[in-house]
Image (spheres, rainbow, N blue to C red):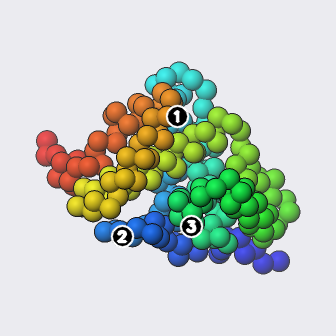
Amino acid sequence: MSVHFFALISRMRHIGRWGLMRNTQPENLQEHSYMTAVFAHALALVRRDILGLPADPDRAAAAALFHDAAELFTGDLPTPVKYFDPDLRAAYRRVEETAARRLLALLPESLRPAYTPLLAEQSDPGTDALVRAADKLAAYVKCLEELRDGNREFAPAARQTREKLDAMHSPEVAWFLEHCVPSFSLSLDEVTPEH
């Protein structure tokens, strides 16, 4: 029995993001998923260890790694297109669900129950919220990095993404925005000062 799931997942690196934008540093889906997982893990840790609220950092990281896996079949549909109207968004959601089922079918049946919540955003509401926030944080950081490199094309996206993050009213997101995100606008020398 050949298991093709992991070979297909490895192809996430071929799916470009920000297709309608000029990028100083191109980003692919694999890179985005990794940073989303790093941020989801961090948000869950902040929630659990700083704010004293329940969270499972490992589950959040795992869910984030696969949060956009359906885009292996759909590509990265630009946000203005994806959210153009409710009917289009609903149709795209159905396409994503079909893609998730196709991915699951590539796994041995005994592994499918473990991957189903990761591919279908059904891990649990708290984890799903952390992954959505981490996804937005990853997009926001990408915008800040582009702005740092002088690419003003990302200014509207940065503003809109920050507004969405603020509208979440998430204490862990607020903490991360205050304590971690400013570093992404700094140079390498500024984030690694000599002691």
Residue found 63% across the figure and 49% down from its top: 63
Residue found 65% across the figure and 75% down from its top: 7
The quarter of the picture where the C terminus appears is top left
- Asked if residue 174 shows in the view, the reply is yes
- Name the residue beneath numbered marker 2: 22
Q: Residues within 10 Å of mark 2 (few under 14, many from 20)?
A: few
Q: CA distance from mark 1 to mark 2?
A: 28 Å
Three-letter residue code for mark 2: Arg
Image location of residue 181, percent across then percent down: 34, 42
Q: CA distance from mark 3 to mark 2?
A: 15 Å
Q: Which residue appears farthest toward the right when viewing the image?
A: 109
- Asked if residue 58 shows in the view, the reply is no
The image quarter in which residue 163 lies: top left
Relative depth, front residue between 135 and 192? 135
Residue found 52% across the figure and 34% down from its top: 168
Q: Earlier in the sequence, mark 3 or mark 1?
A: 3
Q: Earlier in the sequence, mark 1 or mark 2?
A: 2
Relative depth, front residue between 127 and 97? 97
Three-letter residue code for mark 1: Met
> Which label is found at residue 168?
1
Q: Kindly state the secondary structure of the residue where label 1 is placed.
A: loop
Q: Which residue appears farthest toward the top when viewing the image?
A: 52
> Which label is found at residue 133?
none
The quarter of the picture where the N terminus appears is bottom right
Q: Kindly state the secondary structure of the residue where label 3 is placed.
A: loop
Image location of residue 110, percent across then percent down: 84, 59
Is the residue 50 above or below the residue 21 in the image?
A: above
Q: Residues within 10 Å of mark 3 (few under 14, many from 20)?
A: some
- Name the residue beneath numbered marker 3: 76
Q: Earlier in the sequence, mark 3 or mark 2?
A: 2
